Amino acid sequence: AGSYGDQPAWRNPQQSQHHKVIPLSTQATAMMQEAFRQLGMLPQFNARSEAVYQLTSADLYRFYVPEALGSPFIPDQEQFVKPYGIRSVVGMGSQFVSGNAYMLIAFSHIFISDQQSRNFTALAPFVATLLAVYDAKVPLWSF
């Protein structure tokens, strides 16, 4: 897991206090549920509560919330969205051959248009390729 942001603690996953990793074996937040829906990744759980991803169509997907303020899909409006001036949220995600998946979500201080979000997610094949190399070699996803 990686992290970067306005606060120094957000730049180090070990120091980040909130939302650094959201386990799928617990009830997902509204943002995560919407991200999974938009990305086409439907988390399913087996009897041991391990996530298994069922992708609904293509391999790469986009998550986009044009206006974060007031959105039911972006949590912590009072402690995060308002004080940090979050305007838009964009993300991407994909599943690896191993069955693991990644989701990258970015919070922006400026408005991101639909076309700009599509431009951002054009990076998805490159991100997926880079992470797939690590996914195959090391336990990248353990904390």
Image (spheres, grey):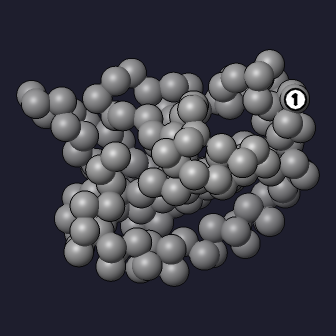
Image vertical order of residue 26 relative to residue 107, above or below: above
Q: Residue at x 51, y 25 (%)?
A: 29
Q: To which quarter of the image does residue 82 belong?
A: top right
Q: Nearer the viewer, residue 19 or 73?
A: 19
Position of 77 with respect to 82 (left or right) is: left
Q: Nearer the viewer, residue 57 or 63?
A: 63
Q: Nearer the viewer, residue 106 or 111?
A: 106
Position of 61 with respect to 114 (left or right) is: left
Q: Nearer the viewer, residue 34 or 105?
A: 105
Residue 68 percent location from the top left of the image: 79, 36
Is residue 58 in view from this perspective? Answer: no
Image vertical order of residue 46 relative to residue 64, above or below: above
Position of 101 with respect to 114 (left or right) is: left
Image vertical order of residue 138 relative to residue 130, above or below: above
Q: Residue at x 80, y 31 (%)?
A: 81
Number of other residues with Cα within 10 Å of mark 1, as a class: few under 14, some 14 to 19, many 20 or more: few
Mark 1 lies on residue: 83
Instruction: Identify residue type, mark 1.
Output: Pro
Q: Quadrant of the N terminus?
A: bottom left
**Mark 1 residue element:** loop
Q: Residue at x 85, y 36 (%)?
A: 84
Q: Residue at x 56, y 26 (%)?
A: 30
Image vertical order of residue 67 relative to residue 8, above or below: above
Is residue 45 in view from this perspective? Answer: yes
Residue 62 percent location from the top left of the image: 58, 57
